[in-house]
């Protein structure tokens, strides 16, 4: 096994490795296997697998599908499928995921929220829909209030039916 990579990473050897110092917002709209080995500060959104290498130092809000952490992450890590902390991994902040694997020696100082995978749920929150549509939560709220999005209010909270959102997206693409 390659040093600092999980068993999941060995199944597909094609990885985009970044060994630089970066600041800002990085968004990958198409699936990619990305490994950060340097320093990163900002916001990182990736479809596919995201790996934080053993020597990496990341201060960011991270959103991904499968996130593997071997270095230091300060911030919030949200994963649709799973987060795996390698023995060298350290998280200072919040982890939100339906599946968490923590190897012996890994450190989490913060909170863990074991969220149900939004892919398997019928209803989505404003935040989940915003991530799904890749827009700000305030935009989703405005669309819901104006009736642009199919939505309903329950206990003073907006909720969105996944199948109705899928239908809405298909209709919007036709226009």
Image (cartoon, helix red, strand yellow):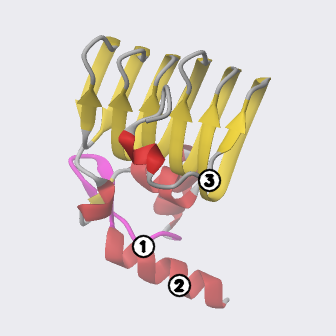
Where's residue 81, x and y in %? 34, 49
Disc nearer the start of the sequence (2/3): 3
Magenta span of residues: 148-161
Apparent side of residue 83 relative to residue 14 in the rendered image (left or right): left
Q: Is residue 109 visible?
A: no
Marks 2 and 3, how far apart at CA: 32 Å
* The disc label shown at residue 13, or none: none
Residue at numbered disc 1: 165
Q: Residues within 10 Å of mark 1 (few under 14, many from 20)?
A: some
Badge count: 3
Looking at the image, which is closer to me, 149 or 106? 106
Identify which residue is drawn at 41% across, 50% down.
128
Label 3 SS = loop
Q: Quadrant of the C terminus?
A: bottom right
Q: Residue at x 68, y 46 (%)?
A: 27
Q: Residues within 10 Å of mark 3 (few under 14, many from 20)?
A: few
Element at label 1: helix
Say the numbered circle drawn on residue 170: 2
Which circle's residue, 2 or 1, is located before the other in the chain? 1
Horizontally, residue 95 falls left or right of residue 16, namely left
Q: Nearer the viewer, residue 151 or 76?
A: 76
Q: Are marks 2 and 3 in contact (CB under 8 Å)?
A: no
Mark 3 — residue?
14
Where disc 2 sits, the SS reads helix
In the displayed structure, 10 sits above or below 19; it is below
**The N terminus: image quadrant:** top left
Q: x%, y% of residue 42? A: 67, 25
């Amino acid at each position: 096994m390659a040093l600092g990579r999980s068993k999941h990473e060995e199944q597909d050897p094609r990885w985009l490795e970044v060994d630089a110092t970066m600041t800002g917002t990085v968004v990958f709209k198409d699936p990619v296997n990305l490994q950060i080995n340097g320093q990163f500060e900002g916001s990182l959104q990736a479809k596919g697998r995201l790996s934080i290498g053993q020597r990496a130092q990341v201060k960011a809000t991270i959103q991904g599908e499968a996130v593997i952490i071997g270095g230091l992450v300060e911030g919030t890590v949200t994963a649709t499928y799973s987060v795996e902390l390698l023995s060298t991994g350290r998280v200072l902040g919040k982890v939100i995921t339906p599946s968490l694997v923590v190897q012996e020696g890994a450190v989490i100082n913060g909170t863990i929220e074991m969220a149900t995978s939004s892919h398997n749920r019928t209803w989505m929150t404003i935040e989940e829909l915003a991530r799904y549509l890749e827009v700000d939560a305030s935009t989703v709220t405005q669309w819901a209030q104006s009736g642009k999005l199919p939505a309903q209010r329950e206990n003073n909270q907006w909720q969105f039916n996944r199948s109705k959102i899928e239908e809405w997206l298909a209709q919007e693409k036709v226009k």
